[in-house]
Image (cartoon, grey):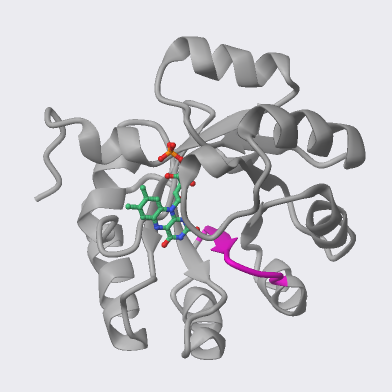
Amino acid sequence: MINKLLGIKYPILQGGMANISTGSFAAVVSNSGALGVIASGGMDKDTLREEIRVCKSKTDGVFGVNLMLLHPQIDELANIVIEEKVPVVTTGAGNPSKYIENWKKEGIKVIPVVPNSTLARRVEQYGADAVIAEGCESGGHIGPMTTMTIVNEVVQEIKIPVIAAGGICNGKQMVASEILGAQGMQMGTVFFGNKRMSYT
Ligand SMILES: Cc1cc2nc3c(=O)[nH]c(=O)nc-3n(C[C@H](O)[C@H](O)[C@H](O)COP(=O)(O)O)c2cc1C
């Protein structure tokens, strides 16, 4: 399962959520044994650096940064994750292939979100460690395939681990995605719907 690759307790990633998953938010998730992920969408480069430092100050756990490839400062953000020694990078809204080699050289685990098996195969060739196969249940910058169809297809097309995302919020849905071949799950909505968690 993906937790072994990432060095976390549970095979669960908190999806980057623009304007929601700050450094403090991600730290709470990482402290719980899943992978907390800071969303850079909506942040400029200085804010991202600051939020990474906040996260590091609040957790000794593994955490990640989500980079939206449509971000106007994407080249600078892609360097900041190297400078700040971020352990895991997830990417959304595009093809991150041109950045992967540099990130891998620095020991960063690279996990792109993919909307189809074509992009999954491409990022595997460029050295991605795993992919997040995200169905349209998640909303946002993703293709028309559902989680049920995309996870099933992508696991047959690539050898690296596949993480399922989109509409997963309980144990039954996690097991269902495992049966489809996923080695981990990324969830978004459930993390900010859970009022018992405090992110401040
Ligand atoms: C409010 C919100 C904001 C999101 N922002 C981003 C983002 O900035 N980058 C990204 O790659 N995915 C983003 N996502 C997708 C999540 O990372 C995650 O993959 C998705 O929420 C999974 O589906 P679920 O909400 O059904 O669990 C966002 C999702 C939500 C609900």
The answer to which image quadrant residue 161 occupies is top right
Q: Is residue 184 above or below residue 129?
A: above
Can the viewer see residue 59 in this picture? no
Question: Is-magenta flag for residue 89?
Answer: yes
- 70 lies left or right of 14: right
Residue 113: x percent and y percent? Answer: 62, 54
Q: Where is residue 83 in the image (x, y as percent from the top left)?
A: 49, 81
| Rendered view: 32 above or below 55 | above
Q: In the depicted view, which residue is nearer to us: 174 or 183?
A: 174
User: Of residues 170 and 23, which is closer to you in this image?
Assistant: 170
Residue drawn where x is 40% and y is 24% of the image: 169
In the rendered structure, which segment of residues is drawn in magenta? 87-96
- Residue drawn 29% across and 55% down? 21
Q: How many numbered marks does the figure carry?
A: 0
| Image quarter in which the N terminus is found | top right
Q: In this view, does 10 lie to the left or right of 112?
A: left
Indicate the position of residue 142 as horizontal and vertical percent values: 59, 55
Residue pictured at 62% horizontal, 33% vertical: 147
Q: Does residue 134 sit above or below 171 in this rendering?
A: below
Q: Which residue reaches farthest front? A: 144
* Picture quadrant where residue 134 is located: top right
The residue sitting at 15% across, 46% down in the picture is 199
Residue 52, position as x, y percentages in the image: 33, 68
Task: Give left or right: position of 102 versus 166.
Answer: right
